[in-house]
Amino acid sequence: MQEPKVSQRDQFVSKIGFILAAAGSAVGLGNIWRFPYLAGKNGGGAFVLFYLSCVIVLGFGLMLAEFIIGRHTQLSSVDAFKKLDKRFTFVGGMGVLAAFIIMGYYPVVGGWSVAYIFKTLFGELSTDAAVMGGAFESLIEGMFSPIFWTAIYMIANIVIVVKGISTGIERASKVMLPTLFGLLIILVIRSLTLPNAAEGLRYLFVPDFSKLTGDVMMAALGQAFFSLSLGMGCMITYASYLSKKENLVENATIVPILDTLVALLAGVVIIPATVSFGFDLDSGPGLVFVTVPAIFATMGPIIGRIFGFIFFFMIAIAALTSSLSLLEVVVSYLIDNRGWDRKKAVTITSIILFIICIASSLSMGIWKDKKLMDMNIFDLLDWFANNVLLPLGGIFITLFVGWFWDKDKVKAEVTNDGSIKFTLFNVWIFLCRFIIPIIILLVLLRGIGLI
Ligand code: TRP
């Protein structure tokens, strides 16, 4: 049913629509591509456990803080902060920058998944690590082909974001998210019935604390932010389109649960299969693209290809519902703050982002050796956004809500003017004041090597 509009600002028209869009933003390459390869690279169980602790302690609290800011102001992040407290406007600015940086490489991986939709259908499918690894490398190291697929992926984003919230993003998310769940379950069953699956599960879930170094903790924290779309005002922006009747606490609980479920399922698909085939757990960004086609190869040529097609199609849509939200952060800033119209904002932003994506893509191939701090352009963008900008954003957002915003106003917003009970209000404020900023700060300092 159509809700009456509070202002002429576009809104999510249904409750489930918002949950799916917010979850659609959260669930993306972060869960299916990044989480499994980080878990593989950073020693498995200890990383996963620390990641889960970050989600529980920080994820819920920060997401709620972002929802409250967004819905209260009905403005995207820069203007939201500007309206609430001018001194914090830079936090919104940092967020727009982070969205820009992430969108400078995210579509490249989105492009790989689009390419793999066709590769699994028509290309080589083998359980041999060398063959699948070779196929992946030849794709990402190429000049034109990955850029071509990135372009296709970008165009899909543009088409949806141009349409705005209720018709574009909401409608797309409603179909995509449920499909994704169904497919993951099928893959979990296949992966767990492979020989040696138990060993992979052990790697993923039994922590070896000697592996929990500063770097690993920082990676887990960064991944929690990235996966939940936190720390850069993305959820502020989405919640700015949310009706005043919604229960924010409920939303801030459901979304992290859904997101974590998808990440864990993806881990359970990929890690045991990687171990079972004897692939390298430490193979980084290629892990999903090498391991999963190999799982499909075991299902026989025809079934394998069909499932492969569906799987990469699903990754592409999961990625799409996330990059939409990233693009929306930049676009809504240009609309709200600079007075641009939507079409102009989307077009110009996308062209600039596409150019950065070309650089990221080439840094996997001909620019492989151009490195700063031992990272190529792609890795550098990823590291700087996720391990630095998002955690810093998280510190400032929670400090703002905890210390600088009138507590009564916060309470009125979160309880919908007293009509909803939130018994843990004081606990949550305490989290925002002390626990969340301090934990983030400690992990950051440890990650940089200062403590
Ligand atoms: N969470 C998404 C993923 O897991 C990526 C993403 C979308 C994101 N919006 C964001 C990351 C905002 C950080 C901030 O793929």
Image (cartoon, grey):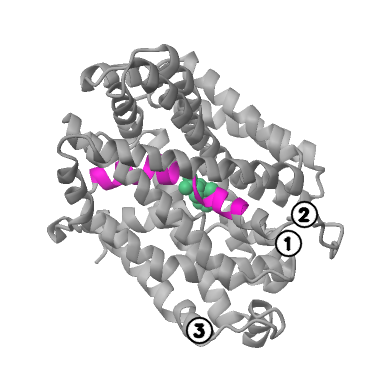
Residue that numbered label 1 is attached to: 75
Measured along the vertical axis of the image, is residue 182 above or below residue 255?
above
Q: Which residues are magenta?
A: 20-41
Residue that numbered label 3 is attached to: 424
Residue that numbered label 2 is attached to: 336
Quadrant where the image shows the N terminus:
bottom right
Gap between marks 2 and 3, in whole Å? 34 Å
**Residue drawn at x 24%, y 43% as measured from the top left:** 41
**Residue drawn at x 29%, y 30% as measured from the top left:** 291
In this picture, residue 344 sits left or right of residue 441: right
Pointer 3: residues within 10 angstroms few (<14), some, or many (20+)? few
Measured along the vertical axis of the image, is residue 114 above or below residue 15?
above
334 vs 407, nearest the viewer: 407
The percent coordinates of residue 10 (x first, y second) are 80, 54
**Residue drawn at x 68%, y 44% as measured from the top left:** 169
450 vs 128, nearest the viewer: 128
The percent coordinates of residue 119 (x first, y second) are 43, 17
Gap between marks 1 and 3, in whole Å? 26 Å
Residue 380 visible somewhere in the drawing? no
Q: Secondary structure at mark 2?
A: helix
Amino acid type indicated by mark 3: Leu
Magenta stretch prevailing secondary structure: helix
238 vs 318, nearest the viewer: 318
The percent coordinates of residue 12 (x first, y second) are 73, 55
78 vs 369, nearest the viewer: 78
40 in the magenta segment? yes
Amino acid type indicated by mark 2: Asp
Residue 81 visible somewhere in the drawing? yes
Q: Secondary structure at mark 1?
A: loop
